[in-house]
Image: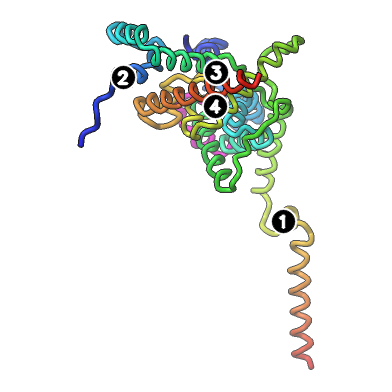
Amino acid sequence: MSPLPPTPHEETIALFSAYFEAELAPPQLESLELHLARCVPCKQEYLRFEEALALLHRVPSLRAPSSFTHRVVARTHEKKRRLRRGPLQRLVVERSPVEWLIPIVLIAALVALVVVVLSS
Amino acid sequence: MRPRASDLHEEVPEDDGRAAERALVARLRAGDASAFPELVLAHQDRVFSIAFRMLGDRAEAEDLAQEIFLAIHRGLPNFRGESRLSTWIHRVARNQTLNRCKYLALRGGDGRTQSLDELPADRQPATDAPDELMARQEAQRLVQDALATLSEEHRMLVVLRDLEGLSYEELVEVTQEPIGTVKSRLHRARLALGRELASRRAAREEDR
């Protein structure tokens, strides 16, 4: 089943962005303005649309937090430093001592156990 | 009424802007250490604005904006200069932001609550008039809350076009979508936003 053709109201609403941005050709412009002059719901819909865009355009742009550039540059330097580090150096510098000490202690204990078992 | 694209691009004449961008890209490629901080400084407000408008949370937006610049830093060797540097930066910002939105949605929080006094500073000149400041903050809050009701793709288009002032040509390059798709999606987003803002205003009037 083919979809129903758009109603004159739907056709009008579909042109709001182009109308707001003054992109309509004269015949379309004329027919849209004629419809808006006669159709209260479409006129109200357009006023809501126009008011929303006017509000958006009035909202001031935001400012990045202070020292933002400094923090970004510091992060790029930190990344470069990390890439230059070898795997062992990365393990020691980037992990907490507990993270790398525990496996070392466990391995040492295991080796000691094996030595004790083999020697007895 | 034209969006603010013209306002933003009027600060520097188009040709001068492009020439300055090309010179900056050449310095970045040559390894000039002062070029990247210059790039960040030139684009940080717009990138942070996009991040905040999309996420609605200042700390999350700052973290995302930093990640966007790290992605730009990583991607600079692959920037071929086919589009303007500012357009490419917007493309990276859009993609990183949509990825962050997906991640936050998976994590189960959208982080879009923000009390009025936590709104970031805007770029308007400081005012001593409390009424004017309150009106500005109220408008910011109203817009922020209404934007949060749109889907991420729709919100992004409204932010890029109606808040950051990108042209349709730039939107096509940033989104990599055909012009017809961009225009119809943006139109639907604006209609939804208009209805949302109207109902929020009506609710406020009733409360008063």
Percent position of residue B52, x then y:
61, 30
Q: Quadrant of residue B93?
A: top right
Find residue A89 and name its label.
1
Mark 3 Cα-neighbour bin, 10 Å: few <14, some 14–19, many ≥20: many
Q: Secondary structure at mark 3?
A: helix
- Of the two numbered discs 4 and 2 in the rendering, the one whose residue sits closer to the viewer: 2
Query: Left of B60 or right of it: where is A53?
Result: left
> In the image, is residue A80 above or below residue B31?
below
Percent position of residue B135, x then y:
67, 15
Q: CA distance from mark 4 to mark 2?
A: 46 Å
User: Label 2, on which residue?
Assistant: A11
Say if mark 1 contacts mark 2, CB within 8 Å. Answer: no
User: Label 3, on which residue?
Assistant: A56
Label 3: chain letter: A
Q: Secondary structure at mark 1?
A: helix
Label 1: chain letter: A
Q: Which residue is located at x 58 percent, y 43 percent?
A: B104
Q: CA distance from mark 1 to mark 4?
A: 34 Å
| Sequence-first disc among 1 and 2 | 2
Q: Secondary structure at mark 4?
A: helix
User: What is the quadrant of the C terminus of chain B in the image?
Assistant: top right
| Sequence-first disc among 3 and 2 | 2
